[in-house]
Image (cartoon, rainbow, N blue to C red):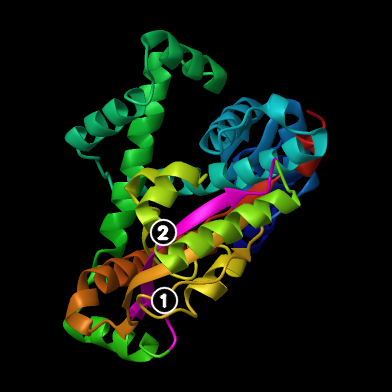
Amino acid sequence: MNTVGSNARFPWRAFLYAVVILYLIADLHWFGGPLRQRLDARRAYSQQSLQRALEKGWVGTVNGEPLTIGQLDQATAVYLHRQGKTPQDLTENALRISRRAALLQLIDDTMVRQYAAADEFKADPEAIRVRIAEFEAQFATPDDLATRREALGLNEEALHALLAEKVMQEQWLESRISEAMHITEEDLRTWYDENVGTDPGIENPQLIRARHLFLSTVDEDTPEREAQIREMHRQLTTGEIPFETLAATFSEDERTKHRGGDLGWFGTERMPEDFSDIAFGLRPGQRSEPFRSSLGWHILEVTDTHDGSRLDFETLRPEIAAWVETERRRYAIQVQMNRLKTVAVTQIFPENFDTH
């Protein structure tokens, strides 16, 4: 009897297995239930996720959060605003490239916002107030500000929210890289020692101070101009007329003629090469023959020189500290963003993107 009763018992275990399997098949392949959605979110790309993106107007997802065409339009407007441009300034191809760059930035911003929210991170309200005030101070009138908001597709509340979110992202990233930003005296000295022989910023360049007489050949280039400059040189050489008088009377350099032709201190990079070659070949008190540059005729007299020198560590310390901090921050943020991208699940749907 026991044997017969056991054989007649309903096969509940097999039935439950069958129900579970049927549910999984239906979830995955028929009605796209929670399991299908979860798997889609974890897959780099799938036909189901593409179909859902096309239907809903998504250009991508970040950890399952959709990014819409509207968000991309706004991100593109902000991206172009930072470059001082509008969509009307670009060709169709250039605008397409800008939209792709804006999409990548939108993905990064979304990732940071998500992880900051997971940390329950809150931005400093005063920092947000200052950022909003700084943005609005760029505009001369409220109408100018309203025009810019309209170009960005934002009302006042949305603009303030965008600026507040940007401050939150920046402060959260700063909090995550704070340990990497500790800079020691040894770090600064190491940078100086490694760059002292190669970085031009460590050298004080050779400088000279000079004065000149100038006749332009831009509008008038005739033999008479050369004759005039040579006569001025003769008058200087014989002492008939002082340099200052000739400069005030005849020189065509309006910036210097009323201060005796004085050019002040300058290095080789400040002046055209065909002028610097002559200037840096003269000693203090020495005067050039009339010579022609790309701008016109000159008579040049060097009044003083300052030899180049190597700046010591203490003199450069503030600049080195600022440079090292900037580079370390840039690298630390890059490392942090790479970490976020490693654990994040992102999808981009180019089919949907290219249809708009």
Q: Is residue 12 visible?
A: no
In the shown orientation, is residue 53 left or right of residue 130? right
> Pointer 1: residues within 10 angstroms few (<14), some, or many (20+)?
some
Q: Position of residue 35 (x, y in %)?
A: 62, 46
Q: Which residue is mark 2?
A: 240
Q: Quadrant of the C terminus?
A: top right
Callout 1 secondary element: loop
Amino acid carrying label 2: it is Glu
In magenta segment, residue 205: yes
* Residue at the top extreme, as displayed: 143
- Of residues 140 and 332, the one drawn nearer to the viewer in this rendering: 140
Tell me where the magenta segment starts and ends, as one range.
Answer: 198-219
Towards the viewer: 252 or 134 = 252
Quarter of the image where the N terminus is located: bottom right
Q: What residue is shown at x 37% (from left), y 26% (from top)?
A: 138
Distance in Å between CA atoms under marks 2 and 1: 18 Å
Picture coordinates of residue 69 (x, y %)?
66, 28
Kindly identify which numbered label has been placed on residue 286: 1
Residue at horizontal 37%, vertical 90%? 194
Which amino acid, by three-letter code, is at mark 1? Gln
Q: Is residue 64 left or right of residue 286?
A: right
Quadrant of residue 318 within the rendered picture: bottom left
Give the answer, above or below, for where 169 lies relative to 141: below
